[in-house]
Amino acid sequence: MNALERQEEALINCGVDPAHVIRAALRRAVKTWNLGPDFVAPSEEQRSRITEWRARTSLAVDAVAVGALLRTHDPLDVLSKWTLIRGQLEPRVWAEIDALLVEIADRSAAMQGAPDEAET
């Protein structure tokens, strides 16, 4: 799992290690995610080429849902399981990266606007 190319600049400039942001986004995204019965083709959006940011994980998914996807979309079992689920999961992770970047920027702005403890 990696960020989108369009997210690179904000990740570099956010003040937090981009790999940590991506891993946090992945954790948030999978908390409420369940594999759906429909195949969603992976997005064609350009992913970041910065490989140090990639996050890997193991996901527990419903065996019945995976079996249904396999029978319908990969009856010869030639695709990886990740290929079958990534179209459902990646957009959630990217949305969480965007949300985290907003949260980081908001907290940074709030800290810059807060009076210094020494001044009060």
Image (spheres, rainbow, N blue to C red):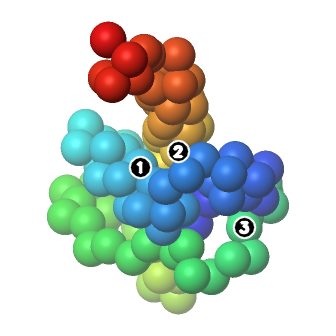
Rendered location of residue 7, percent (x, y): 71, 50
Above or below for 110 versus 46: above
* Residue drawn where x is 44% and y is 72% of the image: 55
Snapshot quadrant of residue 63: bottom left
Type of the residue with mark 3: Ser
Residue 25 is marked as 1
Q: Give coordinates of residue 90: x percent, y percent.
A: 53, 53
Q: Which mark is residue 48?
A: 3
Judge the density around disc 2: few (<14), some (14-19), many (≥20) Cα neighbours within 10 Å: many
**Residue 69 versus residue 118: which sits nearer the camera?**
118
Above or below — where is 67 with respect to 10?
below
Across and down, in percent, residue 95 comes to: 54, 37
Q: CA distance from mark 1 to mark 3?
A: 15 Å
Say which label, 1 or 3, has the lower sequence index: 1
Discs 1, 2 touching: Cβ within 8 Å: yes
Q: Quadrant of residue 61?
A: bottom left
Q: Is residue 1 visible?
A: no
The secondary element bearing badge 3 is classed as loop
Tell me where residue 107 appears, x and y as whole percent: 45, 27
Q: Which residue is mark 2?
A: 97
